[in-house]
Image (cartoon, grey):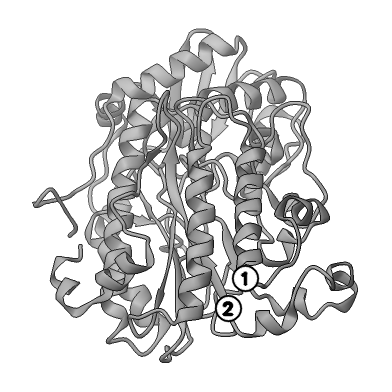
């Protein structure tokens, strides 16, 4: 179990009043009936062997608990949860589960048998991520409902999507508490990973050390952990690699709270506990880029400008190291940043690690804004003006991706801007990404994961043998 202020940390749930407040605020934004699916738990290979249950996020935001094959209906001025009563035959396998009356007391909402669900045909709904739930919704409402990220929504469904986006963009006190809990455990997991690395032989050993902290804290991982010496593979989910002296290990690992709120942190550290000169130089470039970007997290700031700040600052550092030639602002306009920093600087953070991306760019992009097409810019997931209460990640990175650097057609326009001989001197750096979770406030940005050091000196200190006993 992790520790916070010297005491054992265990996650807590929000009060039922938090969810009642969310449902009330949604009713104030939207007048008509609403039907939200919880999603359907998938069978792995036989009926009693199931994948972990994780409810659809919009449903979870308004209920606060995971349910399988259930629905939340708003009709007139009342909300009701429709779910199947527990089957006594399952008690042998799953133990006792709360009955409907018990759920009423626990959730503070009317709970009715699933068999009694008969929603109005004009219900607004949001597309679930699994096709089975979408098919079920289609049958209940007698209209076609697509599944999956970015499924098209129109008419009343579009009005519901916009109302949910407006509601979830700025976090209430319950959501902020959950984000802070996830951040606390995420920080402890990264400290454990650093402590475990010097005695580890494989990426899997470091992964196990990090995820065991999350599990022991009563949480789960918010996404598939990325723990790899192949930092040039942006979402490398394999943990099979061996650890060798002189390599850097990139760990992008986050905890998920009881109610589904996510931590999302990336740190990079040397396998042997000490950065080489070239590794430290490039690490400091990425760190400066991140710090400058975090300073831009203020109300009214356009997130695209946060991204641009990170990219230009990184190019400035690469010019200082002799890897790039020219004026950083001009290099950015030419798209040079996308060669080494091919993704966006971050995204919304909340009930999902990429919050509300099930609704596609409708959530991440303000009305009237579209993705840019330049390399790097095209991958930016968020372009809204920041407001107090929003949470975002800030995660610039530098990568030497062979698929980019060896593509002669793509690299030809940058021949005069990149010194390939100088770049070769930094061959012991495959990828560096530094990521923190940041809450927008009326004043200074609040870095929720600030307790985890990130300067090169701090990383080396965290990896030193004397620090092992203090890891979470």
Return the mark for residue 228: none
Query: Which quadrant of the view contains residue 75?
Result: top right
**Residue at the location (40% across, 44% down)?**
260
Above or below residue 363? Residue 372 is below
- Relative to 187, is 375 on the left or the right? right
The quadrant in which the N terminus is found is bottom left
User: Regarding mark 2 in the picture, which secondary structure is present there?
Assistant: loop
Label ID, residue 399 = 1
Q: Nearer the viewer, residue 205 or 48?
A: 205
Where is residue 127? Give x, y as percent.
66, 38
Q: Residue furthest left?
A: 6
Q: Circle 2 is placed at which residue position? A: 430
Residue 230 shown left or right of residue 460 in the figure: right
The answer to whether the residue labelled 1 contacts the one labelled 2, judged by CB atoms less than 8 Å apart, is yes
Q: Is residue 43 visible?
A: no
Instruction: Return the x and y of residue 269 as percentages of the image width and height.
Output: 40, 73
Instruction: First in sequence, mark 1 or 2: give its number.
Output: 1
Q: Position of residue 150 (x, y in %)?
A: 71, 42
For label 2, count other residues whose C-alpha is less than 10 Å away and answer few (under 14), some (14-19) or many (20+): many
- CA gap between label 1 and label 2 equals 6 Å
Pick the front one: 17 or 295: 295
Q: Does residue 18 show up?
A: yes
Front-most of 315 and 427?
315
Q: Residues within 10 Å of mark 1 (few under 14, many from 20)?
A: many
Q: Quadrant of the C terminus?
A: bottom left
């Amino acid at each position: 179990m992790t520790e916070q202020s010297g005491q054992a940390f265990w996650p807590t749930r929000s009060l039922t009043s938090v969810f009642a407040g969310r449902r009330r605020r949604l009713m104030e934004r939207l007048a008509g009936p609403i039907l939200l699916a919880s999603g359907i738990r998938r069978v792995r290979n036989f009926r009693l062997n199931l994948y972990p249950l994780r409810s659809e996020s919009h449903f979870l935001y308004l209920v606060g608990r995971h349910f399988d094959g259930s629905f939340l209906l708003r009709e007139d001025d009342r909300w009701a949860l429709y779910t199947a009563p527990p089957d006594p035959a399952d008690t042998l396998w799953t133990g006792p589960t709360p009955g409907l009356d018990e759920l009423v007391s626990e959730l503070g909402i009317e709970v009715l048998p699933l068999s009694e669900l008969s929603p109005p045909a004009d219900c607004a709904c949001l597309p679930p991520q699994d096709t089975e739930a979408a098919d079920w919704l289609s049958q209940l409402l007698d209209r076609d409902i697509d599944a999956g990220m970015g499924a098209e929504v129109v008419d009343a469904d579009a009005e519901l999507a916009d109302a949910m986006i407006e509601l979830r963009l700025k976090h209430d006190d319950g959501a902020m508490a959950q984000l802070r809990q996830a951040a606390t455990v995420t920080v402890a997991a990264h400290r454990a990973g650093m402590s475990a690395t010097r005695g580890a032989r494989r990426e899997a050993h470091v992964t196990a050390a990090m995820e065991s902290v999350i599990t022991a804290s009563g949480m789960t991982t918010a996404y598939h952990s990325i723990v790899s010496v192949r930092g040039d593979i942006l979402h490398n989910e394999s943990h099979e690699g061996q650890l060798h002296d002189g390599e850097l290990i990139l760990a992008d690992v986050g905890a998920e709270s009881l109610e589904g709120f996510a931590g999302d942190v990336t740190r990079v550290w040397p396998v042997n506990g000490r950065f080489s000169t070239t590794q430290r130089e490039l690490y400091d470039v990425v760190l400066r880029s991140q710090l400058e970007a975090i300073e831009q997290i203020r109300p009214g700031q356009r997130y695209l400008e946060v991204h641009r700040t990170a990219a230009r600052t990184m190019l400035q550092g690469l010019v200082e190291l002799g890897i790039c030639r020219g004026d950083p602002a001009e290099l950015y306009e030419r798209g040079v940043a996308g060669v080494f920093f091919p993704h966006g600087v971050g995204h919304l953070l909340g009930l999902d690690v990429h919050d509300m991306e099930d609704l596609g760019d409708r959530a991440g992009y303000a009305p009237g804004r579209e993705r840019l097409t330049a390399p790097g810019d095209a991958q930016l997931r968020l372009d809204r003006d920041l407001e107090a209460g929003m949470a975002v990640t800030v995660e610039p990175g530098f990568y030497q991706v062979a698929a980019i650097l060896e593509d002669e057609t793509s690299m030809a326009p940058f021949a005069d801007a990149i010194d390939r001989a100088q770049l070769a001197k930094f061959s012991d750096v495959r990828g560096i990404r530094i990521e923190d979770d940041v809450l927008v406030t009326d004043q200074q940005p609040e870095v929720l994961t600030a307790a985890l050091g990130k300067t090169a000196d701090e990383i080396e200190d965290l990896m030193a043998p004397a620090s092992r006993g203090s890891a979470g």
